[in-house]
Structures are given as structure tokens and as C-alpha cells.
Amino acid sequence: MSRIVLRRRTVPEIGQLRDLVWVCTTTERPDDDVSTIKERPGVFMCHARIRNLRPDQIMDYLAVFGTQGKPPTIEIAIRFPLDVKIDLHHWVYRKTGDARIWYKVRSVEDIGGAQRFLFLDCSIDVVNDIRSDPATQESPPVWETPEAAHG
């Protein structure tokens, strides 16, 4: 029987980094009209531990309360990449599992200040789940992936 760990901020063991994720940045560039094209190109791919901090509400494919002013609901732990700075305007794209999910980074913590693991507190932005019933759950009209935005 597995043990229940009561401490939330524990350094993940190598076997707990099961999910493959893209850490992405936000780029904006003007187009020919007055609008701005926003893209989320991938910066690097890594393995992560993704845990729920509290329940989240998803309606069709969008988070109910959006990403603005909402407390983080997901904790993503990754190995600390020394040559990359991860900040608040970054995104995490979950590549594994049945659901492809875009997470918005809300806060970043270097656990223990040891420059080994980063804990990214995130909120769900958009979900594309292949198990969704098309009759009752609308799918995203356009789905962006980091690979497509990158090249």
C-alpha cells in the first residue's frame, strides 16, 4: 500500500517526472492590419510532475474563470534548466496523456534555492481531450501546439 505524504512541496523523485511538457514563451508581432498575432513557441521540452493543488472547473474546453485573477490550481515540478529563465508570461503545454492542456504560469519557485528543481504554479487555460463527447462538450475551434508555432 502506498504511503500518504502530507507535505506538499517535496522534491520529486526521478520516477515521478512522468509527463512530457513543453515550456513555452509568449511572442507578439503586428500583422498587416491593426491587430497583433500572439504565438506560444516552444523553448524546451522536459519531463515534469503535474499535481492538482485544488479543484478546477472546465466548461467545454475553457477554464470557467479564465486565467486572470484566478489562484493557481496546478503544480508542475521540473528540473531547473540553468540556461533558461522561466517567468510569469510563460506557458506549459502538456504533451502526454489523453488530454492536451495549456497551462498559464502564475508563479515560479526554486525549491530550497538549490537551482535543481522549479515548481511552477499554474492555472488551466485550454483543454483538448480526445475523450470529450462532441455532442455535449465543444472542442477548441483551433488548436495550437508548440511544434507548429516553433517552425
Image: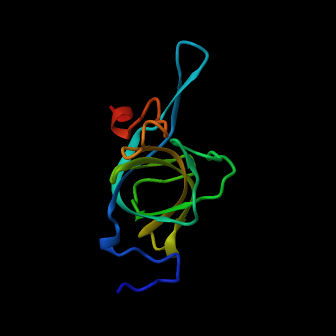
- Using the image as rendered, state which of residue 22 and residue 53 is in the foreground: 53
Picture quarter with the N terminus: bottom left
Q: Image point 52% across, 41% down: which residue? A: 60
Residue 70 location (% of width, % of height)? 66, 53
Q: Nearer the viewer, residue 50 or 89?
A: 50
The percent position of residue 77, horizontal first and vertical second, equals: 44, 65
Q: Quadrant of residue 30?
A: top right
Numbered disc total: 0
Residue 67: image location, x then y, percent: 62, 47
**In this rendering, is residue 7 above or below 116?**
below
Name the residue at the front extreme: 135
The image's colour scheme reads rainbow
Determine the residue positioned at 49% across, 36% down: 138
Q: Quadrant of the C terminus?
A: top left
Classify residue 127 as left or right of residue 57.
Answer: left
Seen from the viewer's position, the closer of residues 116 and 37 is 37
